[in-house]
């Protein structure tokens, strides 16, 4: 399914929600950041749950690359504490190795835990068609596109993992089609943009922008593909979560009291 068809269908759904008197709730946009950024997002999401802000409560979640992995884990109800540390086979990637498609897909199967798209959860996963260069979006309505295949394609960054084959076409990292793709959440109510690798937020349309703080950036190190940084990055996301929860709650529900 093309990006434009999916976006058009979501515009119709959001317009219908507004006609019924709803604002569409709030949208969560999760941006790219490599494996280290994925760990930070997972820790942050786990901490948000503990702090009383369930990221799965968003009316729409847009996930790109690391954000697609985190979005899939959030919407399918993955036990995020279970990914605070990776098994040994998940940490033994040589620094310069480009992951074969099959191994990358297997990693996504471990992290996400299911090939089933979240029922009743509105998740958009972005990627780029390698041959045409066209951005694409999957939302679970495409027959024969398993969730982990879409997530693997969205996070198949050049130099990190081979492109992923879906339906006879090859797809790569969705960040190359529009960064965090925050524009896909336009019209969905309050937009919360969370980016492990901060971009310029001015044109994103976001109401809340959450990024790693200085201490978290130190934990990331210089290589977001460094699997040895996974657990420290996860813990930093967990640490930042209470403050992030306050920002989100204030924007979505209004200040307490």
Image (tube, grey):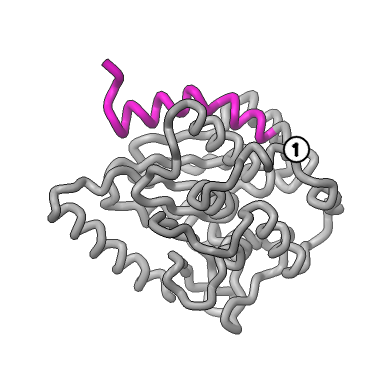
Q: In the drawing, does residue 114 fall left or right of residue 249?
A: right
Residue 256 in the magenta stretch? The answer is: yes
Q: Residue furthest bottom?
A: 168
Q: Main secondary structure of the magenta part?
A: helix
Quadrant (top left/top right/bottom left/bottom right) for the N terminus: bottom left
Between 22 and 41, the one lying in front of the other is: 22
Tag 1: Cα neighbours inside 10 Å, few (<14), some, or many (≥20)? many
Residue drawn at point x = 53 percent, y = 53 percent: 72
**Residue 6 higher or lower than 111, as above or below:** below
Say which quarter of the image contains residue 11. bottom left
Badge 1 element: helix
Q: Position of residue 136 (x, y in %)?
A: 47, 69
**5 horizontally vs 155: left or right:** left
Q: Quadrant of residue 231?
A: top right
Q: Position of residue 249 (x, y in %)?
A: 36, 29
What residue sits 50% from the left and 43% below the top? Answer: 199
Span shown in magenta: 233-257
Residue at the spot of label 1: 229
What is the x, y in percent for residue 78?
58, 47
**Magenta stretch holds residue 80:** no
In the picture provided, is 80 more to the left or to the right than 60? right
At 48% across and 77% down in the image, what residue appears? 143
Q: Which is nearer the eye, 139 or 115?
A: 115
Q: Is residue 241 left or right of residue 57?
A: right
Between 216 and 78, which is closer to the camera in this rendering?
78
Picture layout, residue 36 above or below residue 44: below
């Amino acid at each position: 399914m093309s990006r434009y068809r999916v976006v058009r269908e979501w515009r119709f759904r959001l317009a219908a929600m507004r006609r019924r008197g709803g604002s569409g709730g709030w949208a969560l946009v999760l941006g790219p950041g490599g494996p280290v950024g994925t760990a930070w997002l997972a820790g942050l999401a786990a901490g948000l749950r503990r702090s009383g802000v369930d990221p799965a409560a968003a009316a729409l979640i847009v996930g790109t690359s690391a954000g697609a992995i985190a979005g899939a884990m959030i919407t399918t109800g993955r036990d995020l504490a279970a990914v605070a540390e990776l098994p040994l086979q998940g940490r033994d990637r040589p620094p310069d190795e480009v992951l074969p498609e099959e191994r990358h897909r297997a990693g996504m199967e471990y992290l996400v835990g299911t090939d089933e798209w979240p029922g009743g959860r509105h998740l958009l996963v972005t990627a780029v068609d390698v041959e045409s260069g066209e951005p694409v979006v999957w939302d679970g309505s495409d027959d024969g596109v398993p969730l982990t295949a879409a997530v693997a394609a969205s996070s198949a960054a050049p130099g990190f993992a081979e492109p992923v084959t879906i339906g006879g076409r090859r797809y790569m990292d969705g960040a190359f089609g529009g960064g965090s793709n925050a524009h896909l959440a336009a019209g969905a109510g309050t937009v919360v943009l969370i980016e492990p690798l901060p971009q310029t937020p001015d044109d994103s349309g976001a109401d809340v922008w959450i990024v790693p703080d200085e201490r978290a950036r130190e934990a990331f190190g210089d290589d977001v593909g460094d699997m040895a940084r996974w657990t420290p990055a996860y813990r930093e996301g967990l640490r930042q979560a209470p403050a992030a929860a306050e920002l989100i709650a204030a924007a979505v529900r209004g200040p307490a009291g």
